[in-house]
Image (cartoon, rainbow, N blue to C red):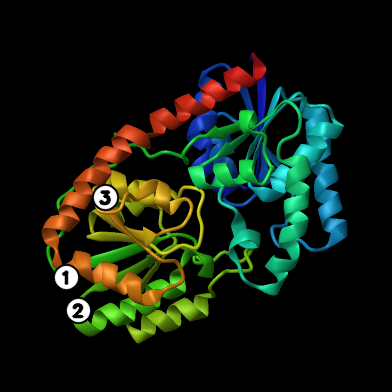
Amino acid sequence: MGKKILYVVTEDWFFCSHFLDRAVAARGAGYEVIVAAREGTHAEAIHQAGLTFIPVNFHRRGTNLFHEAATFLQLRKVYRQQQPDIVHHVALKPILYGSLAALLERKPFIVNAPVGMGFVFTSRRLLARVLKPMVMFAMRHLLNPRRSKVIFENKDDLGAAIQQKIVRAECAELIRGAGVDTDVIEVRPEPPGPVRIVLAARMLWDKGVGEFVEAARMVKRTFPDARFQLVGAPDEGNPASVSDAQLLTWQKEGAIEWLGQRSDVPAILADSHIACLPSYREGLPKFLLEALAAGRAVVATDVPGCREAVEPGVNGLRVPARECAPLAEGLMQLIVDNETRQRFGKNGRLRAEAEFSAKRIIGETLALYRRVIA
């Protein structure tokens, strides 16, 4: 084997969803690939892909200093034992703990990927407001240490990080999301019957789930046959998680259909008419990329990440975040205008092929690895 890459991610499922293709491609390019993450339900898939998996006990809601210190020491031990040539940290806690551990162990090359910005940066809760200044201070010192690169998924986050002097401009890289396999996801004709509107994401308030439900109520007053589907599960490790009980209450009310966690989102999109993501902030949401590849019109919020995927009047509509009425109006506009909806879908597919293909994202990531160890 050649050079060794260590990916550090909070959850094994997130690695499989967003980074497995790149890691497998890195292995094919001659790298030895190791994944350190909390062991959930996807460790076996990582093993079957030919990668080494090491469990690390990340506590995503961790406020116990002893648990957090133990996680940091566990991670530092992994670095000392594995001696990677490149460490690729994904998300906030792996970046902060991993960068410090890598510096202490004198690991030469660090790639940090702050995908999205998480609860601390999107929530208006007191806990988030208290934590944000501390996290910003830590990021200024650990996000971009010497001999490191920082990957951003959208131009808004990249520009803000440079402007706030969190990242040195020469170290910032733009790699837009996880990509989407346009060879696998096909464009199918819209199904007959009432319009179906889909939101697929973790069931978090910060994903705009509450606004989606309220917009569904508004739309159904005019279009009672319209169907609104939520796809995804609550995330117990996230303070912004929507409860199962709340989702079931909405479903019983008739506002939405909750399909739960599904692995066939492209098939669900093929059976729908409109994709919707009223999120408060994103890195670059995979659901929107899948919607573009499936040839579906999109209604999303005018926030970082969603802006990267949705070009207003070309492949979808942008609406203000945290507001229900504009969201409902945008959805109703596409419900009645079949021609515009289908034109948006065709344009979205072209954008997916030209800008967001998995092949392109893999190529950009491997090129970055080559540069940092050159």
Question: On the rendered image, what quadrant is the N terminus found in?
Answer: top right
Label 2, secondary structure: give it.
loop
367 or 31: nearer the viewer: 367
Measured as percent of width and height from the top left, residue 266 is found at: 32, 50
Measured as percent of width and height from the top left, residue 303 is found at: 46, 57
Q: CA distance from mark 2 to mark 3?
A: 23 Å
Q: Circle 1: is it few (<14), some (14-19), or many (20+) Cα within 10 Å?
A: some
**Quadrant in which residue 327 is drawn:** bottom left
333 or 207: nearer the viewer: 333
In this orientation, does residue 184 appear?
no
Measured as percent of width and height from the top left, residue 355 is found at: 36, 35
Tell me, yes or no, whether the two marked residues, 3 and 1, touch with CB atoms within 8 Å: no
First in residue order: circle 1 vs circle 2: 1
Q: Circle 3: is it few (<14), some (14-19), or many (20+) Cα within 10 Å?
A: many
Tell me, yes or no, whether the two marked residues, 1 and 2, touch with CB atoms within 8 Å: yes
Q: Please state if 358 lies on the left or on the right of 108 as rendered.
A: left
Q: Please state if 53 lies on the left or on the right of 339 as rendered.
A: right
245 or 143: nearer the viewer: 143
First in residue order: circle 2 vs circle 3: 2
- Give the vertical position of 225 relative to 107 (above or below): below
Label 1, secondary structure: give it.
loop
Q: Identify the residue position indicated by label 3 in the image.
A: 315
Residue type, label 2:
Phe
Q: Please state if 161 lies on the left or on the right of 202 as rendered.
A: right
Which mark, residue 251? none
**Quadrant in which residue 108 is drawn:** top right
Q: Identify the residue position indicated by label 1 in the image.
A: 194
Residue type, label 1:
Pro
Which circle, 1 or 2, is nearer the viewer? Answer: 2
- Give the vertical position of 69 relative to 144 (above or below): below
Which mark, residue 223? 2
Question: On the rendered image, what quadrant is the C terminus found in?
Answer: top right
